[in-house]
Image (spheres, rainbow, N blue to C red):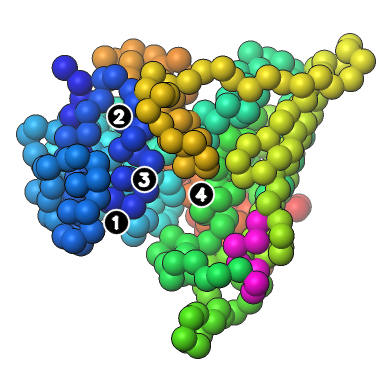
Amino acid sequence: MPLRVGIVGVGWGAHVQAPAFGAVPGYEVAALCARTPDRLDRVAGRLGIADTSTDWETFVRRDDLDLISVATPTPLHTSISLAALAAGKAVLCEKPLAGSTAEAEELAAAAEASARPTACCFESRWLPDRLAVWERVRAGYLGAPYFARVNRSASYWHPSHAPQARWMYDRDQGGGYLAGMLVHDLDYVCTLLGEPAALCAEVRSTLPDRELPGGERLTVTADDTAAVVLRMESGATAVLSVSVMGAHTDFFGMDLFGSDATISGDGTVKGASFRAGRTAEEGLAPVPPSPRRPPGEDRLPGGLAGEAIRSMALMLEDWLPAFDGQLTPMPVPTFADGLRTIRIVEAAHRSADGAGWVSLAPDASPAAASVPGA
């Protein structure tokens, strides 16, 4: 029997999660939950799902649901996920896992205590270009890691670009591109290179307000630009940056240096082309993207949404063995991974506010997190 999935949230949950679950035998999206009845009915009709609810508190306790997928705005992640875990459900939660380190710690502890499968949606690990690089690094291709660099740019908040949704300009609502975009790269670099030990960062909002259609001025509290330098426990250094303030920009670049090899690539938000070479070889050669495709590939759309759905479906496919107590083919992001990225994001804000180098040790309090001698 397939796992019966209940999705809370019909934005990303309906746009990406529902078709991803539908592409993988072993899951069945059985019910949807959202707080706005009209929108819920429209989405449910489009997806062909008759079972709906506007009350998440009763929804997550239903006996006929095995897995609760939390795809709501970030401020609701903690309460919904905790309630679902307490009801004995497996839980998939969108990134960022929570709105604060304290909440993420509570979620990670509850997930460990529940012994139920839990995962955080860092599905971009399974994008074809990234999956190919991940498989090489996991097999030891780089040797001892030396350095990683990630650079992202886009035009989303340049004054010439149309305004985005209001919540994206509000840090308290989960807005900002450090937690919204670069967080995927933070997760990926830690997946490749191991745990971070300390960081120094700049995080800023370039323009203090935004003019909306009609002339209203919206105060901006979320970040549009961030640069993070990580000291890894392995001894490697990682430098990651993002800015959505560049007119006509859409760029992604990544370099990985190690004792045995180099991997380098660039492209756009839609994907990158990587090249790699061992030290004994003459140079860098193309890295073919992973040929893996989800079982329901032929039913999925094209374009950027299709790539997100495909990578999510591959993550879900790799997650299935966990429901039988088995190891997953590739490590599926855990709540502990989600907690790690929240620690990095919060530490980056503290660093930018004047703390300088900040320790990322789990027991380092914000008041005592400065790195001596840095």
Question: What kind of secondary structure does the magenta stretch mostly adopt?
Answer: loop
Kindly identify which numbered label has been placed on residue 343. Answer: 4
**Residue 300 locus on image (x, y percent):** 41, 31
Q: Nearer the viewer, mark 1 or mark 2?
A: 2
Q: Is residue 189 left or right of residue 23?
A: right
- The span picked out in magenta is 154-160
Q: CA distance from mark 4 to mark 3?
A: 28 Å
The structure residue drawn at horizontal position 76% and vertical position 52%, both measured from the top left corner, is 373
Residue that badge 2 annotates: 22
Q: Secondary structure at mark 4?
A: helix
Residue that badge 3 annotates: 15
Q: Nearer the viewer, mark 1 or mark 4?
A: 1
**Of marks 4 and 3, which one's residue comes earlier in the chain?**
3
Q: CA distance from mark 2 to mark 3?
A: 12 Å
Q: Are marks 4 and 3 in contact (CB under 8 Å)?
A: no
For badge 1, the amino acid type reads: Leu
Q: Nearer the viewer, mark 2 or mark 4?
A: 2
The 10 Å Cα crowd at callout 4, few under 14, some 14 to 19, many 20 or more, is many
Q: Are marks 1 and 2 in contact (CB under 8 Å)?
A: no
Looking at this view, is 214 or 103 the one in front? 214
Q: Secondary structure at mark 3?
A: helix
The structure residue drawn at horizontal position 9% and vertical position 39%, both measured from the top left corner, is 62
Tell whether position 299 is magenta: no
Q: CA distance from mark 1 to mark 4?
A: 19 Å
Q: Is residue 267 left or right of residue 197?
A: right
Q: Secondary structure at mark 2?
A: helix
